[in-house]
Amino acid sequence: MKTYLLLTNRAIDEFNRLIGWVLAGLLLVMTVLIFWQVFARFVVGRPLYFSDEIARFAMLWLTFLGAGYAYRKGKLIAVDIVLEYAGKKLSCLLRIVIILCSALFAFIMVKYGYEITDRVSGQTAPSTRISMMWPYMAVPAGGVVIMINSLGLLIDEVLGVPDKPKQEVN
């Protein structure tokens, strides 16, 4: 059983590695498009008509996928004073409850995100004329990433994987 859980966790870590590369690609696309937009507007004198829209859509995807990625890495903001003062068993139980609540929230994101995506699929973006389904699809995709990473965090709790040391900000 422990072997399967470790194998599942390793697969989730590889999935997150892939998500990390996707995030880096999205950030690169945003950076290049915004730089080119500024250059085209102020130097060439002819701004691109589509770059800000694509950069906005990339930022949506970056935000939702990045939230799921950061959740697994423990980089999201958290109020953990209760966990610090609770005993070891209560702290473990509270972390499991928090992970399950996060997974429930992610499930709601997926369910209603798909419904909204379906509703706007007939609309098109003004500049690029692509279906509005694509930017709205970031919501359920981010929910799926959070659900997968919730499973990874739950496996960590069950296996007793120690928390990574927190870095203090001075």
Image (spheres, rainbow, N blue to C red):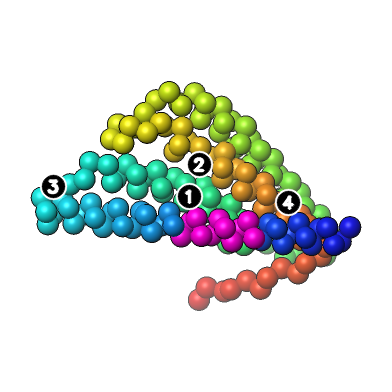
Q: Separation of disc 2 and disc 4 at Cα?
A: 20 Å
Q: Is residue 92 visible?
A: no
Residue at coordinates 44% horizontally, 38% vertically from top-left?
135
Q: Which residue is mark 1?
A: 63
Q: Which residue is mark 4?
A: 151
Residue at coordinates 21% horizontally, 45% vertically from top-left?
48
The answer to whether 111 appears left or right of 60 in the picture is right
Residue at coordinates 51% horizontally, 30% vertically from top-left?
117
What secondary structure is marked by label 4?
helix
Q: Is residue 125 above or below residue 92?
A: above
Mark 1 and mark 4 lie on one chain; the one further toward the N terminus is 1
Mark 2 and mark 3 lie on one chain; the one further toward the N terminus is 3
The answer to whether 66 appears left or right of 73 in the picture is left
Q: Separation of disc 2 and disc 3 at Cα?
A: 31 Å
Q: Foreground residue, 47 or 75?
A: 47
What secondary structure is marked by label 1?
helix
Three-letter code, disc 1: Thr
Q: Which residue is mark 3?
A: 46
* Range shown magenta: 14-24
Marks 2 and 1: in contact by CB < 8 Å? yes
The answer to whether 21 appears left or right of 95 in the picture is left
Q: Position of residue 94 (x, y in %)?
A: 77, 54
